[in-house]
């Protein structure tokens, strides 16, 4: 297998890791919201953190293999000559920023949920926790739309 083919395979693995973390995060978030007791919610939050830790690996793999693809693939045009590539990279940057925000909010949500689990009954909630949950849900949808758009741009490669 040539170095370019290895780089393309690694790039596809990176896309798979990112796609899996976004979809699994969205599904686990919904299960977390449906959980009745705080012990179950804390288990879902622990699982969300574990899944979230895969994201930086996927991002690093995509960045490194993307650079290798551009270098090994003898891409002769200037970097942002193709508009679809520029749009794809901007969406990727937004997804990374949303991922960082999600990690910060996730840590805050975990601390708040742990405190609430110790203090409140099973059905009680906190307005601050609901606010964080709604922002997390919005972040998951932004990332899902972003990854689908990136995949679509990679397949279609439209001329703008």
Image (cartoon, rainbow, N blue to C red):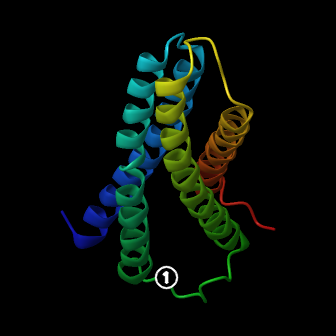
Circle 1 SS class: loop
Counting from the top left corner in percent of width and height, residue 36 is at 54, 10
Which residue occupies 59% across, 87% down? 77
Counting from the top left corner in percent of width and height, residue 118 is at 46, 26
How many numbered circles are shown?
A: 1
Counting from the top left corner in percent of width and height, residue 148 is at 62, 44
Which residue occupies 39% across, 46% down? 17
Q: Determine which residue is flagged by label 1.
A: 75
Q: Is residue 120 left or right of residue 134?
A: left
Rendered view: 47 above or below 34? below
Rendered view: 85 above or below 138? below
Which residue occupies 55% across, 41% down? 109
Disc 1 packing (10 Å; few <14; some 14–19; many ≥20) = few
**Of residues 87 and 41, which is closer to you in this image?**
41
Rendered view: 40 above or below 81? above
**Of residues 107 and 58, which is closer to you in this image?**
107
Q: Is residue 54 left or right of residue 123?
A: left
Res 8 quadrant in image: bottom left
């Amino acid at each position: 297998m040539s170095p370019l083919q290895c780089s393309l395979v690694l790039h596809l693995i990176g896309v798979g890791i990112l796609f899996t973390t976004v979809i699994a995060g969205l599904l686990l978030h919904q299960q977390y919201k449906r959980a009745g007791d705080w012990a179950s919610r804390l288990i879902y939050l622990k699982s969300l953190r574990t899944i979230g830790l895969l994201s930086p690996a996927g991002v690093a793999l995509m960045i490194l293999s993307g650079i290798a693809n551009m270098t090994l693939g003898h891409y002769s045009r200037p970097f942002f000559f193709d508009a679809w590539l520029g749009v794809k990279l901007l969406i990727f940057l937004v997804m990374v920023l949303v991922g960082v925000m999600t990690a910060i909010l996730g840590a805050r949500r975990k601390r708040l949920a742990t405190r609430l689990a110790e203090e409140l009954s099973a059905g009680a909630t906190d307005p601050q926790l609901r606010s964080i949950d709604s922002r997390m849900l919005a972040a998951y949808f932004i990332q899902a739309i972003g990854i689908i758009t990136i995949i679509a741009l990679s397949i279609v490669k439209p001329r703008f």
